[in-house]
Amino acid sequence: LTLYILAFYKTFEGESTMATTDEKTCTIRTKKFMSNPLLQRRQMVIDVLHAKRPTVPKSELTEKIAKMYKVKDPQTIFLFGFKTVFGGGRTTGFGLIYDSVVAAKKFEPKYRLVRQKMATREASTRKTRKERKNRQKKVRGVKKAKVTAGKK
């Protein structure tokens, strides 16, 4: 089964230069590009070279990647895990481009959907979470769900 899945992966490397104001340009390079049909997405490692500039905002990167890969809806692009090397100038992170918003909502973790404003976070205080956890410890099995649902 894994050999069959690996046969579908396609490799592609792209590069794009983005100019903003004066000497503040940045280059976006994608590497380890894969098409992942099981999760209905394309995934890649993103290198951002920004020599005379601070770290590039994710909103700018999303726009540029949407142009690079001809994405219709920028909401289907998820960028995360960016780390800037010591001394600056280069940032590396991970990017996912889903085929549709429905696929993104199906496969993405809830916290990343909240970051993209595609889901809302449950507004509960630390105290209520701890009280719920302690009520759940007193019951076993399916009753745990009933304890949390009844006390909301």
Image (cartoon, rainbow, N blue to C red):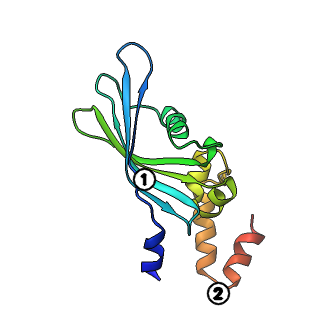
**Could you say which is closer to the camera, residue 91 or residue 1?**
1
Tell which residue pokes out farthest to the bottom in this image. 141
Inter-mark Cα distance, 2 to 1 = 40 Å
- Up the image or down, 141 lies above or below 26; here it is below
| Figure disc tally | 2
- Up the image or down, 83 lies above or below 23; here it is below
The answer to whether residue 34 is left or right of residue 109 is left
**Are there few (<14), some (14-19), or many (20+) residues within 10 Å of tag 2?**
few
Tell me the tag on residue 141.
2
- Up the image or down, 77 lies above or below 63; here it is below
Q: Which residue position holds label 1?
A: 44
**Image location of residue 89, percent across then percent down:** 28, 31
**Are there few (<14), some (14-19), or many (20+) residues within 10 Å of tag 1?**
many
Tell which residue pokes out farthest to the top in this image. 22
Tell me the tag on residue 72.
none
Q: Residue at x 61, y 52 (%)?
A: 113
State which quadrant residue 38 falls in.
Answer: bottom right
Which image quadrant: the C terminus? bottom right
Tell which residue pokes out farthest to the left in this image. 87
Q: Residue at x 55, y 58 (%)?
A: 41
**Could you say which is closer to the camera, residue 111 or residue 41?**
41
The answer to whether residue 143 is left or right of residue 30 is right
What type is the residue that disc 2 sits on?
Gly
